[in-house]
């Protein structure tokens, strides 16, 4: 089973600053990696798929990078609406089909 | 507007059954595979089940295999999750989610999510 590990669990950053979130896979998932944002009381929202492709309507301040086992989500200049929990997800097509990381909570410093 | 709306959640006792539904609108339903994803209170996301665009291919998480059955009715733009033998560990908000890849059996990212339906298993 592919295990996804996100770090840190909580990240405190000031508005306007850059945030860097990490996701590590226990084995290679190629570029089959997505990032989601979830705010309290809301469903997750797709930000990035294919490790680096922004989903429709996602601002350019969100970027994804990496391949294989190491991935990064970068938010270049944090806006107030960006403070949320972020999940990575692999979909490499091995059982189980999908696994999520445990999430990183991005909070206001 | 592309939309998924779940229903069917509720409070049940351990061992009982429940059937969840998800109705889609705003896209060509039978072009896309769908999944169920759940989230226990205060916890992270857990993928539950996946079904391809035609309904002919499905996969399950080990935690629900043999107890849950995913199906779809393309004529009614609907996705279902039949849950049997429910346990307290199945208590969660259940989301249906649409894949962002057309007519493929391969896994893909989820670009549309419903708001979820809550399932509570308690004695």
Image: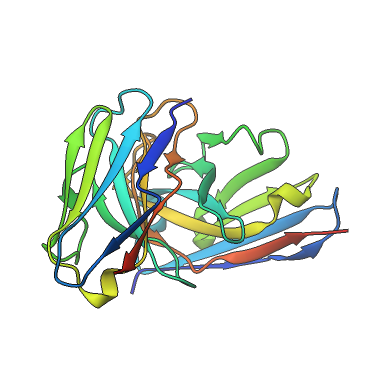
Q: Is residue B122 above or below residue B57?
A: below
Which residue occupies 18% across, 36% down?
A66
Which residue occupies 80% across, 44% down?
B85
Which residue occupies 32% across, 34% down?
A24
Residue A52, horizontal then vertical, whole percent: 17, 45
Image position of A41 (left or right of A93):
right
Q: Is residue B9 above or below residue A50?
A: below
Image position of B53 (left or right of A18):
right
Q: How is the model colour-coded?
A: rainbow
Residue A65, horizontal then vertical, whole percent: 16, 42
Q: Quadrant of the C terminus of chain A?
A: bottom left
Which residue occupies 78% across, 47% down?
B87
Q: Is residue A34 above or below residue B29?
A: above
Residue B104, horizontal then vertical, whole percent: 34, 38
* Rendering quarter of residue B92: bottom right
Regarding residue A14, the answer to whether it shows in the image is yes
Residue B17, horizontal then vertical, whole percent: 80, 53
Image position of B47 (left or right of A62):
right
């Amino acid at each position: 089973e592919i295990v996804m590990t996100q770090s840190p669990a909580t990240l405190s950053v000031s508005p306007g600053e850059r945030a860097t979130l990490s996701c590590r896979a226990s084995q290679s998932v190629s570029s089959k990696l997505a990032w989601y944002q979830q705010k309290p009381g809301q469903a997750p929202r797709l930000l990035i798929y294919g490790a680096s492709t922004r989903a429709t309507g996602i601002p350019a301040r969100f970027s994804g990078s990496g391949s294989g086992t190491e991935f990064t989500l970068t938010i270049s200049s944090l806006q107030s609406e960006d403070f949320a929990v972020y999940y990575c997800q692999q979909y490499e097509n091995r059982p189980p089909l999908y696994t999520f990381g445990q999430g990183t909570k991005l909070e206001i410093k | 507007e592309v939309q998924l709306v779940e229903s069917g959640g509720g409070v049940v006792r351990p061992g009982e059954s429940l059937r969840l539904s998800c109705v889609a609108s705003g896209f060509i339903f039978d072009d896309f595979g769908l999944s169920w994803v759940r989230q226990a209170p205060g916890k992270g996301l857990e993928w539950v089940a996946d079904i391809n665009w035609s309904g002919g291919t499905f996969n399950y998480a080990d935690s629900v295999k043999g107890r849950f059955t995913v199906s779809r009715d393309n004529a009614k733009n609907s996705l279902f999750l039949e849950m049997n033998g429910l346990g307290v560990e199945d208590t969660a908000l259940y989301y249906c989610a649409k894949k962002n890849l057309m007519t493929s059996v391969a896994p893909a990212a989820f670009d549309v999510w419903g708001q979820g339906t809550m399932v509570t298993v308690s004695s």
